[in-house]
Image (cartoon, grey):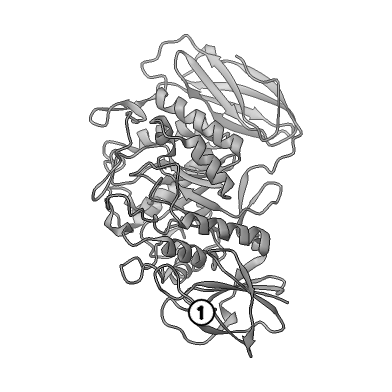
Amino acid sequence: MTGPASLPIRTVGEWVFESHKAYYSPFADVQVDCVLTSPSGSTVTMPTFYDGDGIWRLRFNPGEVGDWTFQLTSRPHNPDFAMSGRFKATANVTRGTLRATPDTGWGYSFEDGTPFLAVGDTVYDLFGMEYCGGDIPGFLERRKAQGFNLLRTRLTISAFHPPAGDFNWQTRPMWPWGGSATAPRFDLFNLNWFKAVDGSIARIEAMGFGLELIMEGWGFEFPFNHRMVFTPEWEQLWMRYVIARYDAYNCVYFWTPLNEYEYYPNGDWNWKPAADRWLIRVARWIKDTAPHGHLVTCHNGPVVPPFADRFRADPEAIDSVNFQYWGTRDKDNAWLAAGIEEVIQHAFAGWQGARLFAEWGYERNPDFENKLPHHEFCDRNHTRRSAWRGISQAMGMINGQENSWGPWMLLDRDQPGTADITVIRNFLTEAVPFETLRPASDLVRGSFATGYRPLALKSVSGEVAVVYYPAGGTAEIAFAGANAQWFDPRSAVWAPATADGAAFTCPPGTDSDGHPLDMVLVLHR
């Protein structure tokens, strides 16, 4: 056995050991675990994984300074695995792993207490794009410079999205199991694929990004739409393997069992009580199997009933909801992205966990063939207004761009709305203290047409208010004695704001569609 004698806390250590016993399927026919004892005497069990040629690996990330010991166990017993060892975990300046803190900040903080504002991008096939020759390193460098810190991606890669979304960039097979999609061997894993993913994740870890690692892709695709074939036994073997391989990485912020989980069990995209029960069961199993405490989250499709009702049998099984809703996206109203805040308020009534606004429409690139009609009118104005509507509910954000989310792979350029996300990020981290802001709908007085009502946040100290006007207009703001400024969410330009009594009128002008400007009113006492 080889491995580090010491390593700093919150870094990944890897130990390698070997067995000469021949197994029909070394992935499935033996279970090798490692029981680790911390300096304080607590124990955790970390699964190991087979990596070919008689080699097993243990990856572990200590969170406690001092002397650790460990003991391998196997079932059925194999004397080659009767190994023990020790290592020293040394002090390290680190923010640690991400935790859910629903009552602090905007629901997420690192172990050292630093609040986390999610500024994310959905790149479902990030690993596959790199595997097929895409310039993912260059893409990540640009996203980092733009202020992004979280990527939604999955460990199984799609080739198609209904109704016509063929993924034409795929030049290599990315089936992660043995056999093929027509003759699967779920007791084997494709090590070429996983070793490529290893390289991507190591880079992401070094760059400081976080990942939402989606364990199972869309439920309408094979094998997830055939639960009589992909049985719970194969599902558990799959999830155990990816946990063993990647749970030790700090960049794993979220384990998401199934993208748009209501597809369970048959690929039918409607809310079902059985899907909620499945998610609770699987979430508990992940928590029992993955020792590093990464958040277990769900990503929804349908938005009713509220999550507090869905998970009332075990509300603490799910740490976080990465919430999907697009608002209006028809030809006449996509620019306004109306309805988002109302749906969020309904969905999270009574919910005590953390939450992110994750997906609100992949900004359309008009240079591409329109393979997905429901994206057609999702332009820059939809991107920006949707983001601000989510921000008004004190939620971090994870968007997506048609250039990179799935069917297309155009990684060296962005749609215009990406710049608006960077403006939001800079505003919330430099101009106002985002972690202190809370929704404050009572600040806005008056009646408004659907989608036109300004949306307010106020700091817990009462010293700062932020009011987003989605489409111009006048509103009475109940925040007396304030120094007021307008902030342009496109250009980041500031201008003085004056009130008529308590009423503030949005500056005149139109956006790129000819609709009334959206602007942000910032008030300081």
Residue at the limit of the structure toward the bottom, as seen here: 501
User: Which residue corresponds to the image point at 53% horizontal and 84% vertical from the top-left?
Assistant: 474
User: Which residue corresponds to the image point at 39% horizontal and 58% vertical from the top-left?
Assistant: 361
Q: Which residue is mark 1?
A: 508
Residue 423 location, x and y as percent? Answer: 57, 59
Type of the residue with mark 1: Pro
Residue 368 location, x and y as percent? Answer: 31, 49
Residue 225 location, x and y as percent? Answer: 28, 43
Residue 66 location, x and y as percent? Answer: 76, 30
Task: Tell me the SS state at disc 1.
Answer: loop
The answer to which quarter of the image holds residue 104 is bottom right
**10 left or right of 449?**
right
The answer to which quarter of the image holds residue 504 is bottom right
**525 left or right of 262?**
right
Q: Is residue 171 above or below residue 404?
A: above
User: Which residue corresponds to the image point at 41% horizontal and 61% vertical from the top-left?
Assistant: 325
Q: Quadrant of the N terminus?
A: top right
> Callout 1: 10 Å neighbours few (<14), some, many (20+)?
few
Q: Is residue 492 above or below residue 183?
A: below
**150 left or right of 364?**
right
